[in-house]
Image (cartoon, grey):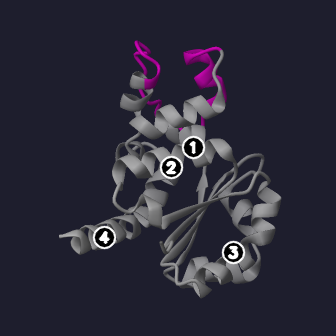
Amino acid sequence: MMREIALVVEGPSDDDFWRRLLARLYGASEHRVEIVVTRDRGRLIARSSDLVASHRDDGYRATFFLLDIDRDACVRRVLDRFPEDVRRSAKEDDDVFICVAVRGLESWYLADANAVNTVFEDAEYSVPADVEGANPKSELRRLRPKYDKRWLARRFGNEFDPAAGGRHSPSLGRAWRLMSPKLQALEDEILGEQT
């Protein structure tokens, strides 16, 4: 089966989250989405030109690089780490996208109060005004002092609503506005083929 969209992520918990989320939201097309896991952000960025070229050669519709801001001061610093050709493609073309989770993927989780309250039963959580400014790992430890990162990713993948979270997290809102039309077009095409 031909892969058509690539999500390039930083680690196994990101992989767990995206696999669960895509299976739930885009079940017909989930097998046409390749998730490339690179445990090291530096290596991911270093390989980005080769990944884009390979995905284009293979006829992919889109390649999404999904990274955390980590210790960088701002999104621009993360973007500046990418090779010039990838930055140019992300700016000018319709098949390469760099999406940066401000603070981290965990900030995106915390942008969806319904998901948080489902994952952490009886949490009575509400999204703070500046969810991207808070320390997401501290907030998650407050909700559940001991948690396994991969367990958490799988649970949120089962419950998370990116559109709802995107209303509170600008970085998630941007990423989802870029991703969802590509994913929905693939899903619609596949469902059309099945009828």
Say whether disc 3 or disc 1 marks the residue closer to the N-terminus. 1
Q: Looking at numbered disc 3 in the image, what kind of residue is underneath it?
A: Leu
| Amino acid type, mark 2 | Arg
Q: Residue 171, relative to residue 48: is it above or below?
A: above
x, y percentage for residue 105?
A: 59, 43
Q: Is residue 130 above or below residue 57?
A: above
Q: Which mark is residue 16?
A: 1
Q: Is residue 115 above or below residue 69?
A: above
N-terminal of the pair, mark 3 or mark 4, is 3
Q: At which x and y percent is residue 27?
A: 35, 54
Image quadrant holding the C terminus, namely: bottom left
Q: Which residue is mark 3?
A: 51
139 on left or right of 62: right
Q: Which residue is rendered at x = 42% and y = 15% of the image?
A: 121
Q: What's the CA distance linking mark 2 and mark 3?
A: 20 Å
Residue at image position (63%, 41%) is 13
Vertical order, 84 against 133 (above or below):
below
Marks 2 and 1, how far apart at CA = 5 Å
Task: Give coordinates of residue 2: x percent, y percent.
Answer: 49, 75
Q: On residue 27, which mark appears?
A: none
Q: Which residue is mark 4?
A: 190
Of residue 169 and residue 10, the one placed in the foreground of this image is 10
Assess whether mark 3 and mark 2 are in contact (beta carbons under 8 angstroms).
no
Q: Counting residues from the N terminus, which is met first, the one under dot 2 or under dot 4?
A: 2
**Residues rendered magenta in the picture:** 119-145
**Three-letter amino acid code at disc 1?**
Asp
Which of the 4 image quadrants contains residue 65? bottom right
Note whether residue 130 is visible.
no
Specify few, some or many for label 4: CA neighbours under 10 Å numbering under 14, 14-19, or 20 or more. Answer: some
Q: Where on the picture, by quarter, is residue 79?
A: bottom right
Q: Which mark is residue 19?
A: 2
Residue at screen point 61% across, 87% down: 57
